[in-house]
Amino acid sequence: MRPLLLCLLTFVLATPTPSHTHAQNKKKTVAVLEFNSSSREIGKDELITLSNRFRSILVKTNAFTVLERGKMSDILKEQNFVMSDNCNSSECAIQVGQLLGVEIMVAGDIGKLGNTYSVDLRIIDVSTGQILLSETRDHEGKIDGLFSAMTDVGNAFAGIKAPDEPKNSGSGSFTDPRDGKKYKTVKIGLQTWMAENLNYRTDSSWCYDNEAATCEKYGRLYDWEHAKIVAPPGWHLPTQQEWEMLLNNYGGPGREAFDALIEEGKSGFDILLGGSRGSLGNFDGVGWYAGIWLWDNAGPERGWVLEVHGSERSLGLFSDNNEYSSYYVRCVKD
């Protein structure tokens, strides 16, 4: 046998693929080749990390049994077989699969065009060379966002249907009886939220940059003492637990929740990056940051803030010990 150059492999034992590939009850053995890339922006270490993560993703579906990696190396060593860095074709996958005694192989490519990454993974039948199943997912943003895209692919290979999105009305409204201002509302899960920041004028509340037009767009910024009491009748400042409940509809704090809750996201919640007001009266962050007040679960003495970072496409809940800072208010229905 002509030796090829060395290439890493990740192994798993898999359940049957969906019915249009293998309609059998017996689990199938599968080896996952290290992913390949033609993009210079994706390095070997990143490909190894993504390959290993895909292995973990398959395991977490609870539809796969893992073959210990050391055992895999032993099998290849016994066969005196060395593989190339480009062992990602059907021909190479079949050759490797036959040596390992597996039934199917997974090969994949990670590409990048502009700011968009593309995941293209396929299942190959070792006995026939036929591609049994191919899945492609795109991701715009940083490379670590591929973990979510690969989770979708792993679930598809395991025949697991993606969960339904939380339903929302997206068309409700509420009129504040105190000043007649009308707000959009959205129902997500069991909660009904204002889909806009509160814009009720009080002492110690400000428009960003002290410009009235910014209040119309972003709502008003409140210090902690006024944020605690500014909610209209029938509504209240949300607690940490209520925010966590909302975020958990979209995978918890992180990029998925950011993408869902940001303006024009799929939730209809429409967070705007309206900045904040600092303790010295300075305004900062419009266009790339937003802070929104919430109760500490322990009580009203200390405020927490939902911090939203546009450049990082992330959000999370943090304690705020500076009572002189000012942030926006989103109310949840009683």
Image (cartoon, rainbow, N blue to C red):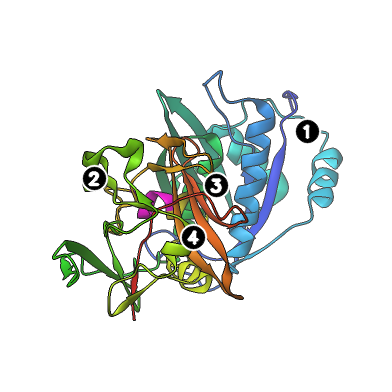
Name the magenta segment's main secondary structure.
helix
Q: Secondary structure at mark 3?
A: helix
Q: Position of residue 163 (x, y in %)?
A: 39, 68
Task: Residue at 46%, 73% (x, y): give it.
Answer: 242
Q: Residues within 10 Å of mark 2 (few under 14, many from 20)?
A: some
Q: Is residue 326 magenta?
A: no
78 relative position to 183: left or right = right
Q: Nearer the viewer, mark 1 or mark 3?
A: 3
Local packing at callout 3 (Cα closer than 10 Å; few below 14, some 14-19, many 20+) is some
Q: CB under 8 Å between callouts 2 and 1? A: no
Name which quarter of the figure residue 321 lies in: bottom right
Depth check, mark 3 against mark 4: the one in front is 4
Q: Which residue is mark 1?
A: 81
Which mark is drawn over residue 224?
Answer: 4
Element at label 2: helix
Q: Of marks 4 and 2, which one's residue comes earlier in the chain?
A: 2
Residue at the spot of label 2:
217
The x, y position of residue 212, in whole percent, is 23, 41
- Check if residue 260 falls in the magenta segment: yes
Label 3 vs label 2, nearer the camera? 2
The quadrant the N terminus occupies is top right
| Lateral position of residue 177 relative to residue 47, left or right | left
Of 73 and 246, nearer the camera is 246
Q: Position of residue 281 (x, y in %)?
A: 47, 39
Range shown magenta? 258-262
- Cα distance between the residues tagged 1 and 3: 31 Å
Q: Mark 1 or mark 3, which has the lower sequence index?
A: 1
Amino acid on which the number 3 mark rests in the picture: Phe
Q: Nearer the viewer, residue 302 or 19?
A: 302
First along the sequence among labels 3 and 2 = 3
Residue annotated with mark 3: 147
